[in-house]
Amino acid sequence: MVANPPAILYSIFILSCPASKSLWETDNRFHYFDNFQKKAVLGLVNRKLKEERHHGDISLPVSSYRMEPPYSARYQELECHWHDEMELFKVERGSVRVRCGSDYFEAHAGEMVFFNSGELHAAQSLDGQALNFAAVVFSPEMLCGDSSDIARRKYVSPVLEGKLYPQRVTRPGAEQDGQALAAFDRVMDLLAKRPPAYELRVRAQLLEIFAILTEQGQSVPQREKAPAQGIKTSIDYIRAHYRQQITIGQLAGMSHMSDGHFCRLFKKYTFKTPVQYINRVRLSAAMDLLLESDRKVLDIAFDTGFNSLSYFIGVFKQSMGCTPTEFRRQHGRPDTNWREAV
């Protein structure tokens, strides 16, 4: 084991990892700490906000992840994102503010949050501490068989369709909640150690958790999906066109909202203004180019959508605590014969 490894969660750093690799798989073959140190910076948004890689593999579509200090980063948040899998997210230490779908709440150490398939979700540290949590991400197919399976028809499909609303936050205290939290810990342990027949035990523990969450959930009318879909549409547009000029009017128009309503809703879902979000996407792209090429800072700034070198350097320094040149040097990139504007 690497001393004090910078353990990280897939959803924050996927942009900095090749699509075929994961940054913190439970399989010891996939610990890319060196890649993290050189390329990943906590809190920068993934340009491909919807994760496109699969968690686990087709035969066992489940993965576990941890994020715990120390790690070389300044940020204390999980960027807004979504994926097709369901997710169990357990706070190990501290407190976080969570945004998930239309829900907005706090979660504290020892508590577990359920994220449904396709739900936008984000989290921020509430107490100034570094984020410290564990997550299990799994395909809903882990919970049921084909279309004739009663588990699919009675439980899994209604949850996916928004007709059955599982318990969102599981807290220590009640007996059943304690059983769900213990089952989560067992899944983490099984995926880390992989003992004989662990695949069956992982599935059994996930079914136990899902049974408790749905038993204590409630049937609700299908929730309004238009606002969240509008935000997803705007995010998709940002990550596809970040190199170009993007205006609030453009984003609001494609989301079928007024400028003011769009800005309020965007920040509600992502914890950021549209401008802050666009800058994060552009900074993430710029960091890739700084570390993977010898191109001039000026060229990188314009290629990633910044229309001013001084503005790019200012935004970069405000977010990263250093200039692009210093960032390059800190990560072992050689100097090129250019200099930054100040």
Image (tube, helix red, strand yellow):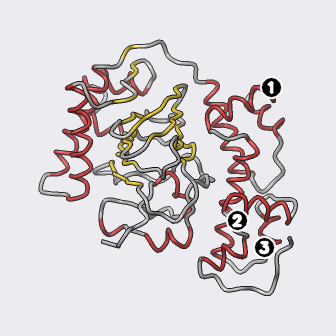
10 Å crowding of disc 2: few (<14), some (14-19), many (20+): many
Residue 227 rendering spot, x and y as whole percentages: 64, 26
Q: Is residue 134 above or below residue 268?
A: below
Tell me if label 3 and label 1 are in contact, CB under 8 Å: no
**Residue at position x 63%, y 39% from top?**
271
Marks 3 and 2, how far apart at CA? 9 Å
Indicate the amino acid at tag 3: Val
The earlier-in-sequence mark between 3 and 2 is 2
10 Å crowding of disc 1: few (<14), some (14-19), many (20+): few
Label 1 element class: loop
Residue that mark 1 sits on: 258
**The N terminus is located in which quarter?**
bottom left
Residue that mark 3 sits on: 297
Residue 267 rendering spot, x and y as whole percentages: 67, 35
The earlier-in-sequence mark between 1 and 2 is 1
Q: Along the line of sight, which residue is nearer the eye, 199 or 309? A: 309
Residue 226 rendering spot, x and y as whole percentages: 63, 24
Marks 1 and 2, how far apart at CA? 31 Å
- Image quadrant of residue 44? bottom right
Is residue 149 in sight in this rendering? no
Residue that mark 2 sits on: 286
Label 2 element class: helix
